Image: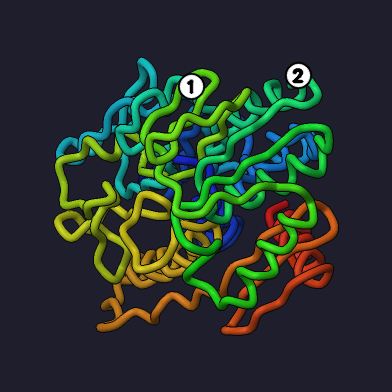
Amino acid sequence: MKRLLLLGGGYGNMRIMHKLLPNTLPKDYEIILVDEKPFHGLKTEYYALAAGTKSDKEVRMSFPEHERLSYVYGEVSNIDLDKQLVTVGENQVDYDILVIGLGSEDKFHNVPGAKEYSYTIQRMNNARRTLKMTAELPSGSTVGVVGAGLSGIEIASELRESRKDINIKLFDRGERILPDFPARLSKYVERWFIENNVEVIPHSNITKVDQNKLYNNEEAIKVDASIWTAGIQPVEVVRSLDIEKAKSGRIKVNQYHQIPTDEKVYIVGDCADLPFPPTAQTAELQAEQIVDVFKYTWADKELPGTMPSLKVQGMIGSLGSKEGFAYIKETTVTGRIARILKSGVLWVYKLNAK
């Protein structure tokens, strides 16, 4: 049997498995999925786990089951593209086709103390650790959230909903929240924070993190805990690969989502250098095109001269359980409708991923 080896059980590889099984995978192929944990984590919901508004069970799903699908659990420590071997713990797994979708980890931008003293939500174990911290904070404590992108906004608002008795400071590097989106959307989010007593600090530049202090432009600000949401990067084993990468550490890919020097190796999700933010939506769109490329290859057909552009629909975020914001097909939606949209997207995803 030939082997299609999928590294990482995130949104991209989940979509690949569901597209190929049960009827599209050639009879002479098997799929092996490698992941550190025996379930699919709903990374877009980790902020709610960290804030204590969703349980661990609500932010994970079972992997699919099929007679030609097997799993290897453990951490990937090495990827040898020349020998077509992947090291997982003490085991080595060979492949005929490889899809690297190992996701991302926090990027601390060499800020002293950020890694040592910050809590994060990028990985489920990190979100669990952050949950323990947020649940045990004494009343009147102050939490500083560094980074006012989508993750920072969602954890700050969800934390406000779960802990109305603490102070929350959101440090935003820009002049206004979500500067790449319409001003109407930014103003709505900013107004929500004002009404819910979350202090947004614009023009922030966190230069140092201590156990109980954040240094913003060298001003020391007392906090009881810090949550870092100010950037991500591919995991270290991907960053160490000796292939062409962008400044972000993400791997350069051709239009077929392959590394240009090896058509047997595909990159999906946060590890791929794309002209879009690294989101679950982008990973799923990539995955669908990767499956299309598989179909051409397995049928011995020539690949299209030009692949269609990825049609990223937009962005949806939550502000607690009742309000939200969205920018979809150049249309701004705010309030209850946006929150319902986000809940609906999650419901449909869970339904289709069963």
Where is residue 35? Give x, y as percent.
49, 33
Where is residue 57? Give x, y as percent.
77, 34
Which residue does the image show at 56% across and 34% down from the upper left? Answer: 227
Where is residue 226? Give x, y as percent.
56, 30
How many marks the image carries: the answer is 2
Q: In this view, does 346 lie above or below 3?
A: below
Q: In this view, does 278 lie above or below 179?
A: above
Q: How far apart are the alpha carbons under marks 1 and 2?
A: 16 Å
Compared across the picture, whether 72 is left or right of 110 comes to right
The tag earlier along the polypeptide, 1 or 2, is: 1
Which residue does the image show at 51% across and 58% down from the upper left? Answer: 279
Residue at which label 1 appears: 117
| Mark 2 neighbour density, 10 Å: few (under 14) some (14–19) many (20 or more) | few
Q: In this view, does 83 lie above or below 313?
A: above
Disc 2 marks a residue whose amino acid type is Glu
Disc 1 marks a residue whose amino acid type is Tyr
Query: In this view of the protein, can residue 64 be seen by the observer?
Result: no
Residue at which label 2 appears: 136
Which residue does the image show at 44% across and 75% down from the upper left? Answer: 310
Residue that lies at the very extreme toward the top in this rendered image: 90
Q: What is the quadrant of residue 134 in the picture?
A: top right
Compared across the picture, whether 238 is left or right of 214 comes to left
- The kind of secondary structure element at disc 2 is helix
Which residue does the image show at 65% across and 26% down from the upper left? Answer: 128
| Mark 1 neighbour density, 10 Å: few (under 14) some (14–19) many (20 or more) | some
Where is residue 105? Give x, y as percent.
43, 37
Q: What is the quadrant of residue 338 in the picture?
A: bottom right
Foreground residue among 164 and 264: 164
Residue 332, numbered label: none
Which quadrant: the N terminus?
A: top left
